[in-house]
Every structure is written in C-alpha cells, then in structure tokens.
C-alpha cells in the first residue's frame, strides 16, 4: 500500500498505523531550513526537520572560535529567496550569520516542524512499502522522501597525530571551541594554517603570551577587503530589494570570473599567483619568512585563504612560524622532526572538519539491501550530485562533485534544493512510489565529470581534502556556478526508473480477478 498524507498500513487491522511523512529533512542549518522553505513554497506541508542539536544554525551555531567569519561576501552568502538587508559588514562574523539563520526559522515559521536533539543513526529503504525508515536512536520515523541537508562541515574530530593523547594541557579544536579557556598570557601552539587558522591566529596573538604556528603547507592568501556596511546602504536594501539583488548579482559575476583561474589551470591562474605573491611581498618584509610562506602549488589547487591580518600576526614579537614537520605530541607540547621540544600550555588544532566523502556518518541501506558507505568507499558518485542509483526518493545536498572552488556554497546549495523539490513534487503530484536514477545515466554523467576535472587546478598536483587517497576528485564541480545551476534546474523524469502507484496496484490484483 502506498503511504502518503500521514496514512499507513495495518496488518489484518491489528498493527498500529505508521505516520508516514511526505518528506524528512535532516539538518536545521542553512541547507535544511532552505529546503523546508522551498518545500512549503511548492505546497509540501507534511515535512519534518530532524536536528541533532538543541537549536538551529549548523556550522554557524558551532563556529564560535575567535575571528570566525565568512570568507565569501555576506550579500552572496545567503539564499536569493531569503536575503538579509542588514548585514553589518562585507564579511559578516559567525554570530551574525547564526542570528540570520535563527531569524529564517522564525520568519518562515519552521520551528514547529523541527525535532531538536534528534540525531539520525540509520536510513533504510523499505521496498515493499516504498518509504524510508529513519532511525534516531530508538526512535523510528517514516517518510516517502528524504533530503540529507546536514552540510559538508557538520562533524569534526582531533587529527591523528602521534602522542596526541599524551598532552597534559587543553586540546582545543577550532570547530568545537572552548570558550571557557583563558588564553591571556598563555603559551599556545596552533597546528594548521588553513581557513580557520588564518582567522584564529590574529586574535590569539592579541592576548596570548606566545603563539607558535605549526605549518605543514603554505597556502595562497589574498587580502580580505572588509568594510562596515553604511546605514544608508542597509536602508536602501530594506526599501529597494532590487538594489540588494543588483549588489548580489555583481558579486556573483565577479566570483564567476575568478573561475577562469581558480577552477581551470590557465594563464589567469598565474596572474592570481602573482597577485598573491605581491600581497605577500608587500606585507612580509623578511625574505626568509616570505620564502616559508610561499606556496609550491598552483593557486586554486587547495582552498584560497582570505585574510588581511594573518601575515601581520605572524610577524608579531610573540608569534613564531614553525615549518619543521611534527614528530610527536608530548605531555609538555610539540616535538618537531629537528628534535626541538616546544613546550606550551595549550594546543589549538585548526585542522578543519571531517568531510565525509564516503557519505553521511550513519549507515544508509538502499532498495536491494546495498550499503551507500560501501559503494562510496572508493569513488563516491551521484547524478548531478543529488541522486544515487539504488537509493530512491533520497536527495543529497553537498553530494559528490558539488563543491565550488570560486563562488558561494549557498549558490550551489540553492540549486540542489530546487532539484530536490522538483523530484519530491513529481513523486507527490504524480503519486509515484519511487524515483531511482538509472545506473547508465549516473555512470555517463560521472565519466563526463571526471574527464572535465582532469584539466582543473584541483588535479594539478597538490594534496587536498578534495581528493580521495588515490587521487579521485569526489568533491568539486568542474565548471561555472551558472553551469551547475543550469543542470540543477533541469529535472528530467526520463533519467529515473519510475515505480507508479497505479502499476503497483495492478500488479497486486489477484490473477483470477485480473482475467475478468
């Protein structure tokens, strides 16, 4: 029996009826709330949002480290259908972004649909009933469709470094900041020089007694031109939404132009590198330090870093850059491969997030009992980053090959949301049991993706989290954001194997009646 509108089957009239929702959305950050907003707009009212924490916000709820801010301009780091005219700065701090997400939940009346403190532990597709069984501990929920909207930066853990458990002082992870620890006058080691580190280090240098920065690989750093938004501009954006849209469009096009050097390995990439070296030369006077901070890979191969105060912080008297590899963590601090022992009071691990290339951090079982984690353990693949063969009625956001190397993640996410909503609308409006992307369609799409990726900067020789251990790029989309959005706006039912309710009912008719 097909399950819809909250109705469920009974076995001989004795089994308790299941409530089967139209859609379950996993995650109540930007992506999950945006999905719910667009589902409501499409007329899908029977939805539930599952959130493992006790409030909305996702990454921006958890990013409380000093200096935390977006490295994409705020006007572009939002949904076009839910803009914020009151951003305080060009690049807004994390607390303001979190407040915006909370405001979205209130403005669109989504709080009533969120089940907080509910962490998903398993997804299983029930083929006979054509719905997903969503486990959250001992609880079970049921839905015709599921959208995984937990985002790529939802989990983090300490890195695997020899001796890490031996350190006697506080071990503070950038993604899980300890706001109770007082850094004033302390000696601190910072391990990592990526996107969070270039925000944390300048703030730590202001208060700590000493800061030792342990760098494995120097990154390309561009100046971040960050201004306070004038009140007049906020007023104009409030009264004339078209003005804010024009500003957003201008920023979008500027970032699109950057793709010619950050996505593809071209002469423009060399120009970007020259700009990065000029910024380094103008900011760092010491030649030896400049040499240590000069990357040895093409711009764009790793994530570009945006900061105007990182280089100055490294040159403060209480800060020292260390480029010798870490040999081990000791009870007293960090020992490098040159044999030196660096004694510190605390270690900050600015080592990023656990990006789950192999799928979400809970088991997902498909239509024939197959495991998504096993299928994605080598080379994760999906169709348009949103659907995977064998996992019907399941839609991914931030799935394989959906990452931007030059533009706002939320621009890409908005396209993913619209694609998922198109699929869910087709299921509901045409009363389908399921949609399952065809294997040959998925395979052909991924052959094209990998061919296009071969000429990108991400494949130009560096090691990054974009790649699997054997160098397979499962993360990034090899093109302009406009190209990505165009493919996501084109939901084609012919790309899917369709199981309809009408066909299932006919199949279940007894043979003697079918012959009448």
Image (cartoon, rainbow, N blue to C red):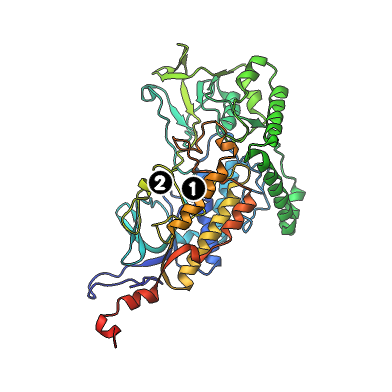
Quadrant of the rendered structure where residue 145 is?
bottom left
Residue at 65% across, 19% down: 290
Q: Residues within 10 Å of mark 1 (few under 14, many from 20)?
A: many
Q: How many angstroms separate mark 2 from mark 1 (CA)? A: 10 Å
Q: Is residue 339 left or right of residue 515?
A: right
In the rendered image, residue 112, in percent from the top left (x then y), is placed at 47, 61
Determine the residue located farthest toward the bottom in the rendered image: 516
Is residue 177 among what the camera can see?
yes
Location of residue 42 in the rendering, given as x and y in whole percent from the top left corner: 54, 67
- Vertical position of residue 126 compared to residue 207: above or below: below
Is the residue 268 above or below the residue 147 in the image? above
Relative horizontal placement of residue 249, taking residue 345 as reference (left or right) = right
Label 2 secondary element = loop
Secondary structure beneath label 1? loop
Depth check: give the residue in front, 370 or 253: 370
Q: Position of residue 429 (x, y in %)?
A: 48, 73
- Of callouts 2 and 1, the N-terminal one: 2
Residue name at image x 65 percent, y 41 percent: 91
- The front one of 229 and 214 is 214
What residue would you read off at disc 1?
Answer: 400
**Residue at (64% x, 55% y) in the render:** 83
Q: Are marks 2 and 1 in contact (CB under 8 Å)?
A: yes
Residue ID for mark 2:
376
Q: Residue at x 59, y 32 (%)?
A: 199
Please identify the quadrant where the C terminus is shown. bottom left
Please provide percent x and percent y for residue 503: 37, 75
């Amino acid at each position: 029996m097909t399950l819809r509108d909250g109705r469920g089957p009974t076995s001989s009239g004795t089994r308790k009826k299941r409530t089967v929702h139209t859609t379950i959305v996993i995650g109540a950050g930007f992506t999950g709330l945006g999905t719910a907003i667009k589902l409501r707009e499409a007329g899908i009212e029977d939805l539930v949002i599952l959130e493992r924490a006790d409030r909305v916000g996702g990454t921006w709820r958890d990013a409380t480290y000093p200096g935390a801010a977006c490295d994409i301009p705020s006007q572009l780091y939002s949904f076009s259908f839910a803009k914020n005219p009151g951003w305080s700065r060009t690049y807004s701090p994390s607390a303001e972004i979190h407040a915006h997400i909370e405001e979205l939940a209130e403005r669109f009346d989504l709080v009533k649909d969120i089940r907080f403190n509910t962490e998903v532990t398993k997804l299983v597709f029930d083929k006979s009933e054509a719905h997903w069984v969503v486990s959250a501990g001992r609880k079970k929920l049921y839905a015709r469709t599921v959208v995984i909207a937990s985002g790529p930066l939802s989990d983090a853990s300490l890195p695997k470094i020899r001796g890490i458990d031996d350190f006697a002082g506080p071990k503070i992870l950038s993604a899980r900041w300890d706001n109770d620890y007082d850094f004033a006058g302390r000696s601190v080691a910072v391990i990592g020089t990526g996107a969070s580190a270039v925000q944390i280090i300048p703030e730590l240098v202001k208060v700590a007694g000493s800061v030792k920065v342990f760098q494995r690989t120097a990154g390309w750093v561009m100046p971040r031109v960050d201004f306070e938004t004038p009140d007049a501009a906020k007023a104009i954006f409030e009264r004339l939404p078209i003005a804010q849209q024009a500003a957003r469009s201008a920023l979008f096009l500027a970032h699109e132009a950057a793709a010619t050097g950050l996505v593809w390995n071209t002469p423009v990439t060399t120009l970007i590198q020259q700009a990065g070296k000029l910024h380094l030369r103008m900011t760092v006077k010491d030649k030896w330090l400049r040499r240590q901070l000069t990357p040895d890979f093409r711009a764009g191969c790793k994530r570009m870093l945006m900061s105007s105060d990182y280089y100055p912080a490294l040159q403060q008297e209480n800060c020292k850059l260390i480029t010798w590899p870490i040999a081990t963590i000791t009870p007293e601090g960090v020992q490098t491969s040159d044999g030196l022992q660096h004694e510190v009071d605390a270690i900050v691990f600015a080592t990023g997030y656990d990006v789950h290339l192999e799928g979400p951090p809970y088991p997902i079982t498909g239509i024939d009992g197959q495991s998504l984690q096993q299928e994605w353990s080598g080379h994760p693949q999906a169709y348009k980053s949103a659907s995977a063969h064998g996992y019907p009625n399941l839609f991914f956001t931030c799935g394989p090959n959906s990452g931007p190397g030059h533009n706002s993640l939320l621009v890409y996410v908005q396209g993913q949301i619209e694609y998922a909503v198109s699929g869910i609308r087709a299921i509901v409006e045409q009363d389908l049991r399921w949609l399952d992307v065809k294997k040959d369609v998925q395979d052909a799409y991924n052959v094209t993706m990998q061919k296009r990726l071969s000429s990108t900067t991400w494949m130009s020789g560096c090691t990054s989290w974009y790649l699997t251990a054997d160098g397979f790029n499962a993360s990034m989309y090899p093109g302009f954001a406009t190209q990505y959005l165009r493919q996501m706006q084109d939901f084609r039912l012919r790309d899917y194997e369709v199981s309809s309710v009408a066909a299932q009912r006919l199949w279940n008719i007894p043979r003697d009646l079918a012959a009448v």
